[in-house]
Image (spheres, rainbow, N blue to C red):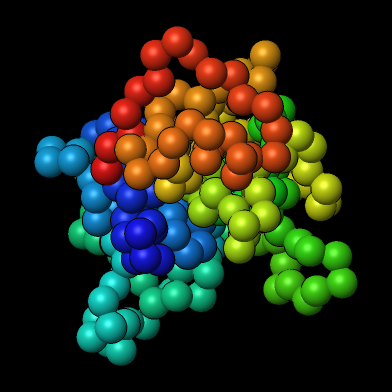
């Protein structure tokens, strides 16, 4: 799969985790593709921590040139009919009050216990952590959507080596290779992409996986 196909597979599968009426926060990058794959009849309320509730899906190039609003990542955005612009305190009150049903975040590293590292690589400049720590701790479900490896190096590890965003916060991991559930016993391989063998998934993962007798089929 090329890069765009890979992202579509991940975003398409992630969209199946949502139900009609969910309040959802999307991280920067790949997570913003998810609204384009929502099943028919499923409408969600997109929340952006910089102060939008009822944000629209990602804009195409032509729409971006006419946008006067940006999302939390600084990308052109819009507010849908019925949505609202809110102040930062209210926006973070929504997160910290447990009103976000699902947060989809990218990750630099995630481990078998559900620890998440996605805000800094030591020695590199970053603009700040944004709302990542609040979302990891406050959303009802935290779902990591990411490529399985970084140029061949596993991103799913026995233990994160980078500074953590939050401890034991991740509920589900979705990559191009499969779907992994964080359980008290470890990381359970729930679904596998037909494009990959079980041996390939194990080899690309930096920790032991729990393998059930019947593994589901990952679908977009």
Q: Relative to 189, say whether 40 is above or below.
A: below
Instruction: Please state if 39 lies on the left or on the right of 143 as rendered.
Output: left
User: Residue placed farthest to the bottom in the image?
Assistant: 65
User: Residue placed farthest to the top in the image?
Assistant: 213
Question: In this orientation, which residue lies closer to the viewer: 77 or 186?
Answer: 186
- The quadrant holding residue 19 is top left
- The quadrant holding residue 186 is top right
Looking at the rendered image, the quarter that the N terminus falls into is: bottom left
Residue 149 can be seen, yes or no: yes
Place of residue 132 in the rendered image (x, y in percent of width and height, measured from the top left): 64, 52
Instruction: Please state if 3 lies on the left or on the right of 217 as rendered.
Output: right
Place of residue 195 in the rendered image (x, y in percent of width and height, measured from the top left): 35, 44
Question: In this orientation, which residue lies closer to the viewer: 103 or 12?
Answer: 12
User: Residue placed farthest to the right in the image?
Assistant: 123
- For the point 80% across and 74% down, which residue is it? 124
Q: Relative to 77, say whether 185 is above or below.
A: above
- The quadrant holding residue 98 is top right
Place of residue 64 in the rendered image (x, y in percent of width and height, measured from the top left): 31, 82
Instruction: Please state if 189 lies on the left or on the right of 194 as rendered.
Output: right
Residue 98 can be seen, yes or no: no
Looking at the rendered image, the quarter that the C terminus falls into is: top left
- For the point 61% across and 25% down, which residue is it? 209
- For the point 70% across and 33% down, which residue is it? 207
- For the point 49% across and 13% down, which residue is it? 212
Question: In this orientation, which residue lies closer to the viewer: 25 or 124?
Answer: 124
Place of residue 182 in the rendered image (x, y in percent of width and height, measured from the top left): 59, 25
- In this rendering, the count of numbered labels is 0
């Amino acid at each position: 799969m090329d890069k765009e196909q890979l992202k579509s597979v991940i975003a398409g599968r992630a969209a199946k985790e949502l139900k009609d009426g969910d309040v959802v926060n999307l991280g920067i990058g790949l997570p913003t593709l998810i609204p384009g794959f929502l099943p028919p009849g499923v409408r969600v309320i997109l929340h952006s921590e910089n102060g939008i509730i009822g944000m629209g899906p990602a804009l195409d190039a032509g729409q971006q040139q006419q946008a006067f609003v940006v999302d939390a990542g600084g990308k052109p955005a819009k507010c849908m009919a019925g949505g609202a612009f809110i102040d930062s305190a209210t926006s973070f009150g929504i997160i910290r009050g447990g009103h976000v049903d699902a947060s989809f975040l990218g990750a630099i590293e995630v481990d078998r216990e559900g620890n998440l590292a996605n805000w800094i690589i030591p020695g590199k400049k970053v603009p700040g952590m944004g709302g990542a720590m609040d979302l990891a701790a406050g959303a009802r479900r935290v779902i990591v959507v990411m490529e399985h490896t970084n140029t061949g190096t596993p991103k799913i590890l026995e233990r994160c080596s980078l500074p953590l965003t939050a401890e034991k916060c991740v509920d589900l991991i979705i990559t191009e290779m499969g779907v992994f559930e964080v359980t008290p016993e470890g990381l359970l391989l729930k679904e596998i992409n037909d494009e990959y063998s079980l041996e390939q998934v194990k080899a690309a993962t930096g920790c032991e996986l729990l393998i059930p007798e019947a593994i589901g089929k990952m679908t977009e």
